[in-house]
Image (tube, helix red, strand yellow):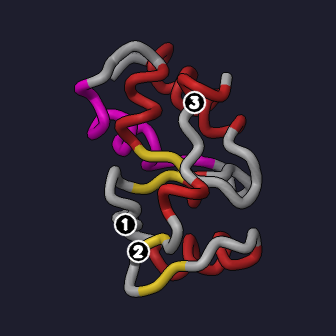
Amino acid sequence: MNELFKQQVYEIIRLIPTGRVTSYGAIAKAVGYPNHSRHVGNALRNYDEDFPAHRVCNSSGRITASCLRDFVGKLSKEGVEVKDNKIQNFKNIFWNPIEEL
């Protein structure tokens, strides 16, 4: 994974509004690599504490990150309900960067 890809992924994630979520795949499509959702996840291995990585989940609305408890807490503070690792009302709060940018 090159540095430009990682920078583009981070730029998209910074644009996700508070209280909304998107998927690894949607981000991959937005940066021009529709089949590289795993690379998006890999790009999120190291980030600053205030970076909104908690707003990214898999395509079915499940939080798959290893820091599940931290992500659930941050999402809860933004009004996003998570039950059994799944974001509730996922389709309603889904933010599609291709359509919204």
Q: Residue at x 35, y 42 (%)?
A: 42
N-terminal of the pair, mark 3 or mark 2, is: 2
How packed mark 1 is, by other alpha carbons closer than 10 Å (few <14, some 14-19, many 20 or more), is some
For the view shown, which residue lies furthest in the bottom direction? 84
Check disc 3 and report the residue beneath it: 97
N-terminal of the pair, mark 1 or mark 3, is: 1
Residue 64 point in image, percent of width and height = 34, 64
Q: Is residue 77 in the magenta section?
A: no
Relative to 53, is 28 on the left or the right?
left
N-terminal of the pair, mark 1 or mark 2, is: 1
Name the amino acid, label 3.
Answer: Pro
Label 1 sits on a secondary structure element that is loop
Q: Relative to 91, is 97 above or below?
A: above
Where residue 8 sits, quadrant-wise, is top right
Q: Residue at x 37, y 66 (%)?
A: 62
Label 2 sits on a secondary structure element that is strand
The C terminus: image quadrant:
top right
Residue 86 point in image, percent of width and height = 41, 74
Relative to 46, is 19 on the left or the right?
right
Magenta span of residues? 35-47
Name the amino acid, label 2.
Answer: Lys
Q: Which mark is residue 62?
A: 1
Residue 36 point in image, percent of width and height = 27, 28
Q: What distance separates the C-alpha of mark 1 from that of mark 2?
A: 4 Å
Label 3 sits on a secondary structure element that is helix
Q: Residue at x 50, y 74 (%)?
A: 88
Q: What distance separates the C-alpha of mark 3 from that of mark 2?
A: 21 Å
Relative to 36, is 11 on the left or the right?
right
Name the amino acid, label 1.
Answer: Arg
Q: Which mark is residue 86?
A: 2
How packed mark 3 is, by other alpha carbons closer than 10 Å (few <14, some 14-19, many 20 or more), is some
